[in-house]
Each structure stands twice: as structure tokens, then as C-alpha cells.
Amino acid sequence: MRQALRYLIRRAGYSLSAILTLALGIGLVSTQYSLIDGLLLRPLPFAAGEEIFHVAHRGSEGGWRTLPLAEFVAQQEATQGELEMAAFQSMSQNMVGTDGLPQRVWGSAVSAGFFDLLRVAPILGRGFDPAEGQSGAAPVVLLGETLWRDAFAAEPGLLGQAIEINGVRHTVIGILPTGVRFPFQD
């Protein structure tokens, strides 16, 4: 043992490079495992998250695309209620609040059963009524708690008020908890 220790001390450069190589290898493997664990192995942070799937198709240009609305509706009708299905589309939107000042916000258009499927309830107000998902229904919106606090000073009286999103007036019906995030949100 002493002889090996003396050898390593005499060859400090070799010893240092071996230690650094081992440290770098262990660090890379640890980082890869953390990414794989977070992206693939852990269930979604929702009730029954392991039973929720994101459905997309390969577009003609080669990239992944979400299902067109007509195809989603056809799939939903084909399951005849055997599966819970919901749709969403995330995008940057223009919002004009009750103060009249415009701002860009990140939001998602979702189908009426979206939050029921995720088992997420608003902390204030109510969720979507199935009738509000029908064509011609009055536009309604659920706001995230962070946006509600930052843009509206956490005003509980905002419920029932109208705000403008992309030029269309929407009635605020509820506030979602802070932890609710969408897959393609920053």
C-alpha cells in the first residue's frame, strides 16, 4: 500500500488526470440519469399522471404536430366516452386587463374537460362548464395564480369581470393554482 501511495505521489500528473477523468465521467453519468429520470421515468405531477398521454402525429414536413381540432373531435366521438380526452394549444397571446394596458402573456386554449382530466381545481372561482366548450358559447378564461397576482394585484373581484385576449372579451371565471404549468410553457 505504501509503495502504491509513493508511486502515485511521484506521478502526480498521472494521478491528477486519472482522478479528473473519473470525476468527469461520474458527473456526466449523474447528469444524464437526472435528465432521463425527470423527463421519462417520473410520472406527470397530476393525479393518475402515469395514465395521461400526449398524442401528436408526424407532419408532412417531418416534424411532430398536434392533432387538428376536427381530428381530435372525431377521435373523442369514436371513443364514445370510454376514454377521457382533452385538447390544448399553447401560444403567446395579447391580453388587455381591466386597467386597459396591453401585455403579452403565455397561455393555452383548452377543451372544456382539460382540468377535470388533470384533476386540477381552481383556487378561486370555478372550472369550465361543458356547455362553455360548445361552439357559440360566451368566451371564458381561467387565469394562473401568478398572472392574477402580478397583473391584477390578486383582486378577488376580478371574477366575473371581462378582460380582452387577442381582441376577444373573455369573462374571468376562476384562478388556477401556481403549480399548474403546461408542457410548452417557459
Image (tube, rainbow, N blue to C red):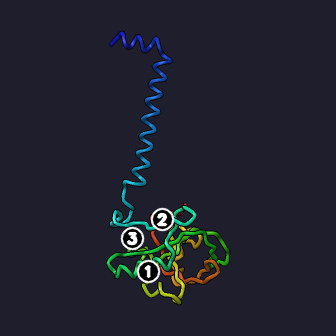
First along the sequence among labels 1 and 2: 1
Mark 2 crowdedness (10 Å alpha carbons): few <14, some 14-19, many ≥20 = some
Amino acid on which the number 3 mark rests in the picture: Leu
Question: In the image, is residue 77 above or below residue 60?
Answer: below
Regarding residue 39, the answer to whether it shows in the image is: yes
Mark 3 crowdedness (10 Å alpha carbons): few <14, some 14-19, many ≥20 = some
Nearest to viewer (mark 1 / mark 2) = 1
Q: Is residue 169 left or right of residue 67?
A: right
Q: Position of residue 75 (x, y in %)?
A: 41, 77
Q: Position of residue 36 (x, y in %)?
A: 41, 49
Q: Is residue 172 left or right of residue 29?
A: right
First along the sequence among labels 2 and 3: 3
Compute the Cα span from label 1 to label 2: 27 Å
Compute the Cα span from label 2 to label 3: 11 Å
Q: Which residue is mark 1?
A: 74
Q: Residue at x 48, y 65 (%)?
A: 181
Q: Which residue is mark 2?
A: 181
Amino acid on which the number 1 mark rests in the picture: Ala
Does the CB distance between marks 1 and 2 fall below 8 Å? no
Q: Residue at x 52, y 82 (%)?
A: 140
Q: Residue at x 36, y 75 (%)?
A: 84
Nearest to viewer (mark 1 / mark 3) = 1
Assign a secondary structure to mark 3.
Answer: helix
Q: Which residue is mark 3?
A: 118
